[in-house]
Image (cartoon, rainbow, N blue to C red):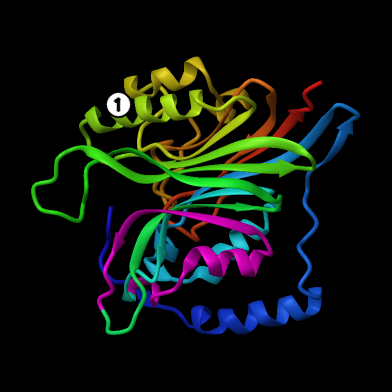
Amino acid sequence: MFRPALRLSRHTRRSKRIAAVAALLLGGAAVAPSAQATTPGELRLRVMAYNIQAGAGSDHVFDLERQARAIESEHPDLVGLEEVDVDWAARSDYTDEAAWLARRLHMHVFFGPIYDLPPDRVGAPDRRFGVALLSRFPILHAANREITRLSTQVPDPVPALGPGFPEVLVSAHGVPLWVYVTHLDYRGEPDVREAQVADMDKIMDGRHGRKLLLGDFNAQPDDAELAPLWTRLTDAMTVAGQRTTPTWPADVPAKRIDYVTYSPGLRALDAHVPDTLASDHRPVVTDLIVRRMK
């Protein structure tokens, strides 16, 4: 959901200078991925799901550099981001957060807007809000697919198909991997989430190969609306014995609503929830084994 304007920290004003210096020191090269061969038929990679609350921490101060450091400290290969502002509002200093984080972390990016609205300033770009994928691997294909939405931007909304479900094909050291990022409806009634799960199932069923679904599901693992997902996907936190480890709110976690899930052909080695207040959610981080297909 949308929140009031946020106070801007001095870290944001310094962030572009920090990123520029880092790029010079690294010579503009991408950071080496953590994925590495474990056996001749396997690769290891690290995956993160993170709701960044439009760049604000649990203190509601906008500080995208703080979130970049929280991501960087985990050395992920793939990061699914939710609540991403792109030229949206003063709360995020009209920053293109997807592009900024990609530059800062030396990663590829695909942004999937949920909302794409006219600017609120003369000569400014459109205001966009949605989800994104950061990837250390090349992006071979990307599309912003539609699932059921109940808009927060129009009066008297009714459920209707809308964008904001990125479908991204990456090449993980030559291994193709479909990655999906989602942010499901936040309302108490599960009806819209039930429709969204059905829509996502249909879209993912149309692609062959290994798949990851990352995101903020706004539901807990045993909630009925998520049950169809568990017939085709595995919850990494459950495999790691942390099924009930909460992710929200970050300062006093009470619910687990953030997920890394995966299809057959992948296997979780471990998963954890970093203790960080860089957003109002804590991220989920999972180490996965990808089996090469013969």
User: Could you tell me the amino acid type at mark 1?
Assistant: Glu
- Residue 280 on image: x %, y %: 41, 55
| Along the line of sight, the residue nearer the viewer: 229 or 74 | 229
Q: Residue at x 43, y 36 (%)?
A: 256
Q: Which residue is mark 1?
A: 194
Q: Residue at x 39, y 75 (%)?
A: 94
- Does residue 115 appear to the left or right of 81 in the view shown? left
Q: Is residue 96 magenta?
A: yes
Q: Quadrant of residue 91?
A: bottom left
Q: How many marks?
A: 1
Q: Quadrant of residue 15?
A: bottom right
- Residue 149 on image: x %, y %: 27, 41
Q: Residue furthest right?
A: 40
Q: Residue furthest left?
A: 156
| Along the line of sight, the residue nearer the viewer: 131 or 225 | 131
Residue stretch in magenta: 91-120
